[in-house]
Amino acid sequence: MGLSTPVVSGIMLIAFTVCTAMLLQTMIMQAQTLTQLIGWYATGEADRLEVALELNIASIDVSSGMVNLTLRNTGSKTIFLRNQGSIRNDVIVAYNASAAAWVSQLVDYQVLEVRIVNTDVTFDPLVHPYLNPGEEALIQIQVNSQVDGIETGSILVVVFVSHYGVTAKTEGVAL
């Protein structure tokens, strides 16, 4: 038992201490990351609780496949209508085609005007590309005519998905 036993024991003690410190630091960093993730999720859920949308079909043009919608902001959060990076809204359309099969599409939309609910006050959507609480937007979509088009008597389901993850759904019959 010479000098080598205490030296090896010291090296082992240092290695054990370093490994324990690294493990502890990793656990602390993971706990911080988990705390941030839970906070981010809770904030998103709180935002979703403050968002409320109503969607109505204003008109369906069977020959051109154009559908006019009215989207109303009945919540307390502003809805941005223009897609910008991670701020994205989508419109999904589903309808029964001639073969009695349902066709669904993700379609682009165009905002025709923004107005204050129950008034004649309108805004240009290029200058006012968002919906504040108490405002509504007239939105136009075009169903892809390369697939079976909308026919008279078709049931049409439209879903607007906001960048908050909140959806508004409406149904109508093409006349």
Image: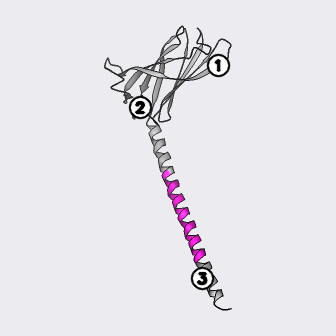
- Per the image, the residue denoted by label 2 is 79
Position of 50 with respect to 93 (left or right) is left
**Residue 34 is covered by the magenta coloring:** yes
Q: Label 3: which residue?
A: 10
Q: Quadrant of the N terminus?
A: bottom right
Q: Residue at x 68, y 14 (%)?
A: 100
Distance (Cα) linking label 1 and label 2: 30 Å
- Tell me the mark number nearer the camera, choosing from 1 and 3: 3
Q: Is residue 10 magenta?
A: no
**Quarter occupied by residue 71:** top left
Image quarter of the C terminus: top right
Report, in whole angstroms, how far the alpha carbon at label 3 lies from the one at label 2. Answer: 64 Å
**Residue that appears at 58% across and 22% down:** 105
Main SS, magenta region, reads helix
User: Residues in magenta?
Assistant: 14-36
Looking at the rendered structure, the secondary structure element under dot 1 is: strand
Residue that carries the numbered disc 1 in the rendered image: 102
Q: Position of residue 89 (x, y in %)?
A: 48, 30
Snapshot colouring: one colour
- Give the amino acid at mark 3: Gly
Question: Which amino acid type is marked by label 1?
Answer: Trp
Is 44 or 4 nearer to us in this picture?
4
Tell me the amino acid under the disc marked 2.
Ile
